Image (cartoon, helix red, strand yellow):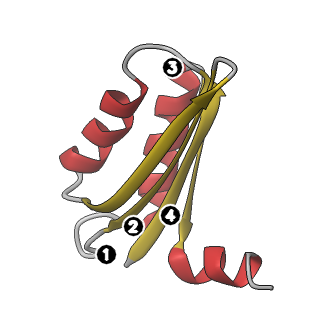
Amino acid sequence: MKLIVTVVGKDRIGIIAAVTKILADNDVNILSINQNILNGFFNMILFAEANENKISLVELQNALRLQGEEIGVEIKTQHQDIFDAMHKV
C-alpha cells in the first residue's frame, strides 16, 4: 500500500530519525521525502510504500502517532488514495 506521512511541529533534533526508524523497523520503503523549517516549525511530507502483510495501516498509524507524541510533533499517516481524494481540485 502507498502512504502519505505528514509531520508538523516545533523543530528539534531527531525528528526525521525518529520517524524513519519506525518506518525502517516495519519494512516501509520511503519513495520520496520533503521537509522544511519555517520560523522554527518543522514540516515534512513523506511518500512511502508498505507491505500490508507485514503491518496494517492502523498499526503503522498508531506507532507513528505515539512516536509523535513522544517527540512533540503531530504525525498523520494516510493511504495515498484518501490523501489524493482529499486534495483533488
Quadrant of image for the N terminus: bottom left
Cβ–Cβ under 8 Å for marks 3 and 2: no
- Front residue of this view, candidates 20 and 25: 20
Q: CA distance from mark 4 to mark 1?
A: 15 Å
Badge 1 or badge 3: first in the primary sequence? 1
Name the residue located 75 percent from the left edge and 77 percent from the top edge: 86
Residue on which the image places disc 4: 4
Closer to the observer: label 4 or label 1?
4
Cβ–Cβ under 8 Å for marks 1 and 3: no
Closer to the observer: label 4 or label 3?
4
Residue on which the image places disc 2: 56
Q: CA distance from mark 1 to mark 3?
A: 26 Å
The answer to whether residue 74 is seen in the rendering is: no
- In this rendering, the count of numbered labels is 4
Amino acid type, label 2: Ser
Q: Position of residue 2 (x, y in %)?
A: 40, 76
67 over 47 or under it: above or below: above
Cβ–Cβ under 8 Å for marks 2 and 1: yes
Residue on which the image places disc 1: 52
Q: CA distance from mark 2 to mark 4?
A: 14 Å
Amino acid type, label 4: Ile
- Front residue of this view, candidates 23 and 30: 30
Please give left or right for residue 85 compared with residue 48 in the image: right
8 over 6 or under it: above or below: above
Amino acid type, label 1: Glu
Which SS class for mark 4? strand
Residue on which the image places disc 3: 71
